[in-house]
């Protein structure tokens, strides 16, 4: 597997997608080992384990979120190639903000592929961010909540049901 540093614009788009949630969506948050700072917008968590601080996605935390994504990407590239491409990140609004959910999902997939070369990827804050952002974006897909909650033998896929209903309308 090869890894590369994603462009800062890629990070801007991921952070933008996390920041621009619908009013009905809860705050996107991750758990971190970092010490609380004014820029982390952290609050103590009751969650046991070594992750004891919850980082909330709030206004003015965009740079902090982007920085830990850059750091995760750089750590992966460093692990793979013994090169250090880390840099100081500063959030700015992406050049384009009309991204469709499927495009954001592909951006998450690309980032994860570039950042997963580290030993602790599965438990990293960057992975948490990607998982939570992916779930939020998946919920925005057209008809995301129209599917069955539980699948049993008597539950048909939408395409089968539509074909059966169309055939009934045509008298077949």
Image (cartoon, rainbow, N blue to C red):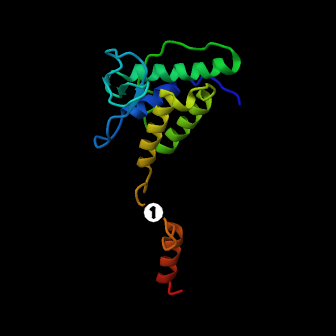
Rendered position, 23 above or below 7: below
Seen from the viewer's position, the closer of residues 136 and 49 is 49
Task: Identify the residue shown where x is 52% and y is 30%.
Answer: 123
Q: As drawn, is 99 to the left or to the right of 2?
A: left
Q: In the rendered image of this protein, does residue 126 appear above or below residue 150? A: above
Residue 93 point in image, percent of width and height: 41, 25
Q: In the image, residue 62 lies at what x, y percent? A: 39, 23
- The residue identified by callout 1 is 150
Residue that protrudes farthest toward the bottom in the picture: 171
Apparent side of residue 114 relative to residue 139 in the rendered image (left or right): right
Packing grade of label 1 (10 A; few <14, some 14-19, many >=20) is: few
- Which image quarter holds the C terminus? bottom right
Q: Is residue 69 shown above or below 23?
A: above
**Does residue 20 sit above or below 172 in this rendering?**
above
Label 1 secondary element: loop
For residue 42, say whether it is visible: yes
Total count of labels: 1
Q: Which of 166 and 117 is in front in this view?
A: 117
> Could you say where residue 97 lies in the image, as x and y percent from the top left?
43, 34
Tell me what residue is drawn at x 28 percent, y 40 percent. 23
Q: From this viewpoint, which residue is outermost toward the left?
A: 23
Quadrant for the N terminus, please: top right
Q: Can residue 95 be seen in this view?
A: no
Q: Quadrant of residue 42?
A: top left
The residue at the far front in this view is: 48
The residue that appears at 40% across and 56% down in the rendered structure is: 145
Q: Nearer the viewer, residue 5 or 29?
A: 29
């Amino acid at each position: 597997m090869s890894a590369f540093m994603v462009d800062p614009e890629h990070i801007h788009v991921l952070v933008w997608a996390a920041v621009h949630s619908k009013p009905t969506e809860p705050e996107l948050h991750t758990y971190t080992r970092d010490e609380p700072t004014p820029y982390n917008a952290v609050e103590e968590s009751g969650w046991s384990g070594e992750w004891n601080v919850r980082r909330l996605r709030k206004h003015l935390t965009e740079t902090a979120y982007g920085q830990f994504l850059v750091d995760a990407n750089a750590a992966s590239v460093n692990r793979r190639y013994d090169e250090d491409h880390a840099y100081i990140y500063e959030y700015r609004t992406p050049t384009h903000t009309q991204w469709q959910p499927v495009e954001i999902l592909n951006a998450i997939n690309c980032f994860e592929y570039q950042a997963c070369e580290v030993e602790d990827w599965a438990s990293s804050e960057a992975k948490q961010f990607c998982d939570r952002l992916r779930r939020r974006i998946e919920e925005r897909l057209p008809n995301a909540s129209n599917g069955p909650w539980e699948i049993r033998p008597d539950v048909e896929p939408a395409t089968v049901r539509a074909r059966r209903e169309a055939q009934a309308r045509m008298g077949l």
